[in-house]
């Protein structure tokens, strides 16, 4: 590990955790590749927590033979209709923005799969006929691999509400690992609600893209989303050399920082497909990680002054 231009980690021991969210406009661009390798790279020197927030299919743990240190269920709070108290006023159906409650004659139908646990129906019910109850939707697991702490949440098959699991995982990490200098969040792909939840509290967002027409199209969506959320962000170009220069031209035109480029090599893809980290075998990837971390450290230092 070089850290040739990086400030000493010791000066950051008592500072607040710097949260890096790694996102992309679409799946398959290399979010998890960057998240796992950056986390392992930092862990050679200092404690770091890697958090997989792609709760529908978390796979960052495939790259680490970690030891399970904690496990707990994730729940979604949903209303439970109490017919003995209900006056059938219809207010619950009126205030639900997600159509999770429907009044059919003298019956209130609750659709848990549509519920976003906003508590509006329960809190506003004048008869207190919709108490909230927990429904298990998945599990949170915490692993240890050397100086790397790995946390993931995984939805049960068939569950659709990712946001509540993402929010709970973030709270768990904030409470348990507030003393760790860096937290890296492997975010869900796309630009929908789960991505917004995963990146809303990040100190910096790294958007991973590829130099292809599809990569550029979805990068534009991701950039628009980050600007709407008022997040600081930069771009890493993965599989550099596979396409054209349009991603670079776009970033230059939009004044978007290009943090690093990871080359397109068959050998890298083969290592990744076997569940291996790539930077120990490729100096150019290690150099890219060093540049990314150096940039993030400069932001972290600036924020602390």
Image: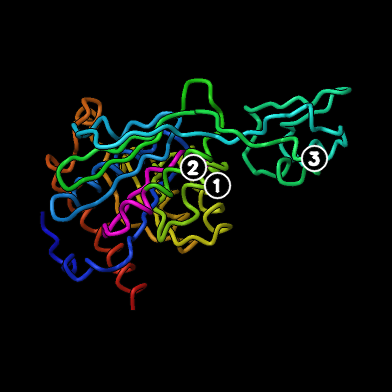
- Which segment is the magenta one? 173-190
Mark 1 surroundings within 10 Å by alpha-carbon count, few (fewer than 14), some (14 through 19), many (20 or more): some
Q: Which residue is mark 1?
A: 221
Q: Which residue is mark 3?
A: 127
Mark 2 surroundings within 10 Å by alpha-carbon count, few (fewer than 14), some (14 through 19), many (20 or more): many
Q: Which residue is mark 2?
A: 25
**Residue 213 can be seen in this image:** no
Relative to 234, 61 lies left or right: left
Residue located 37% across and 43% down the image: 186
Q: SS of the residue at dot 2?
A: loop
Q: Nearer the viewer, mark 1 or mark 3?
A: 3
Relative to 139, 96 lies left or right: right
* Quadrant of the frame with the C terminus: bottom left
**Residue 145 can be seen in this image:** yes
Residue furthest to the front: 84
* Image marks 1 and 2: residues in contact by CB distance under 8 Å: yes
Q: SS of the residue at dot 3?
A: loop
Asked whether 250 falls inside the magenta stretch, the response is no
Per the model, the C-alpha gap separating discs 2 and 3 is 45 Å
Q: Nearer the viewer, mark 2 or mark 3?
A: 3
Task: Give whichever of 222, 85 is nearer the camera.
Answer: 85
Tell me residue 156's x, y (percent): 46, 24
- Name the quadrant containing residue 122: top right
Q: SS of the residue at dot 1?
A: helix
Residue located 28% across and 48% down the image: 49
> Who comes first in sequence, dot 1 or dot 2?
2
* Quadrant of the frame with the N terminus: bottom left
């Amino acid at each position: 590990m070089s850290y040739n231009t990086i400030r000493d980690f010791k000066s950051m021991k008592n500072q607040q955790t710097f949260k890096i969210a790694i996102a992309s406009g679409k799946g398959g661009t290399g979010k998890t590749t960057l998240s796992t390798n950056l986390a392992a790279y930092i862990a050679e020197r200092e404690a770091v927590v890697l958090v997989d927030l792609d709760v529908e299919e978390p796979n960052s743990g495939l790259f680490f033979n970690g030891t399970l240190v904690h496990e707990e269920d994730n729940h979604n709070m949903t209303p439970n209709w109490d017919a003995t108290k209900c006056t059938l006023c219809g207010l619950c159906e009126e205030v639900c923005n997600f159509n999770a409650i429907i009044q059919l004659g003298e019956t209130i139908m609750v659709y848990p799969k549509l519920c976003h646990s906003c508590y509006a129906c329960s809190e506003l019910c004048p008869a207190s006929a919709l108490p909230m109850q927990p429904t298990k939707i998945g599990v949170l697991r915490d692993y240890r691999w050397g100086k790397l702490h790995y946390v993931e949440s995984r939805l049960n098959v068939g569950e659709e509400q990712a946001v509540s699991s993402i929010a709970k995982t973030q709270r768990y990490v904030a409470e348990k690992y507030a003393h760790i200098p860096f937290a890296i969040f492997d975010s869900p792909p796309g630009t929908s609600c789960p991505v917004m939840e995963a990146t809303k509290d990040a100190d910096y967002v790294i958007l991973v893209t590829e130099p292809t027409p599809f990569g550029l199209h979805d990068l534009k969506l991701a950039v628009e989303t980050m600007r709407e959320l008022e997040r600081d962000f930069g771009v890493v170009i993965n599989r550099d050399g596979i396409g054209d220069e349009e991603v670079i031209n776009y970033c230059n035109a939009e004044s978007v920082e290009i943090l690093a480029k990871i080359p397109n090599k068959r050998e890298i893809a083969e290592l990744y497909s076997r569940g291996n980290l790539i930077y120990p075998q490729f100096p150019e990837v290690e150099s890219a990680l060093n540049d990314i971390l150096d940039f993030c450290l400069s932001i972290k230092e600036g924020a602390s002054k």
